[in-house]
Image (spheres, rainbow, N blue to C red):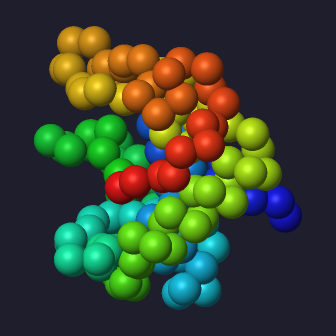
Amino acid sequence: MNMDDLFGQVHSVTTEKTKGPDARTIIACRKLNLPSPPYRMSGWQAMSDGYIIFVNKVLGVKTKGKNKGGIKWGDNRHKAIVLDSEIIADLQAWEVETGKCSTCGGDGQQPAGWSSDRGTLYRDCSRCKTTGIPPTTPIFL
């Protein structure tokens, strides 16, 4: 399996447009020897040089109650430490393999926020300047 297939597998339960690889989830699942999907990041805690990533199994979508449409998580929560240096290395490897900018996923638009009436808002990618091609400058988190 190539890295593009691996990064493409980590996706939202919703139909929201996916932007670039979710390196934190992929690295955490690799360290925990868990398949992604169905495992996905369910939370995180910042550290000085990385994150503590919490990973849960996605069981589906809630169909009733006040959280209808939300993610139905499994009971077993796993955690892994993911360093900034590991994230940068994975993103750089993905860019080399795919030829796409890791910030925007290659379409030139990066997420800029969210609105309840308009959904995810986008702006021109600050890393590739809307070309979708990764620049030669280093990745910074």
Query: Which is nearer the eye, 26 or 75?
Result: 26
Asked whether, in this view, residue 85 is left or right of residue 112, the answer is right
Q: Position of residue 47 (x, y in %)?
A: 21, 77
* 51 in relation to 113, above or below: below
* Res. 40 in view: yes
Q: Position of residue 83 (x, y in %)?
A: 40, 77
Q: Position of residue 28 (x, y in %)?
A: 48, 76
Asked whether, in this view, residue 94 is left or right of residue 1, the answer is left
Q: Quadrant of the N terminus?
A: bottom right
Q: Position of residue 92 (x, y in %)?
A: 62, 57
Residue at the spot 42% in from the left edge and 18% down from the top edge: 124
* 8 in relation to 30, above or below: above
Residue at the spot 29% in from the left edge and 26% down from the top edge: 112
Asked whether, in this view, residue 66 is left or right of residue 42, the answer is left
Number of marks in picture: 0
Q: Quadrant of the C terminus?
A: bottom left
Residue at the spot 46% in from the left edge and 73% down from the top edge: 85
Q: Residue furthest top?
A: 118
* 93 in relation to 105, above or below: below
Image quadrant assignment for residue 136? top right
* Res. 54 in view: no
Q: Residue furthest left?
A: 66
Query: Which is nearer the eye, 17 or 69?
Result: 17
Q: Residue furthest front?
A: 137
Asked whether, in this view, residue 79 is left or right of residue 90, the answer is left
Query: Which is nearer the eye, 46 or 71?
Result: 46
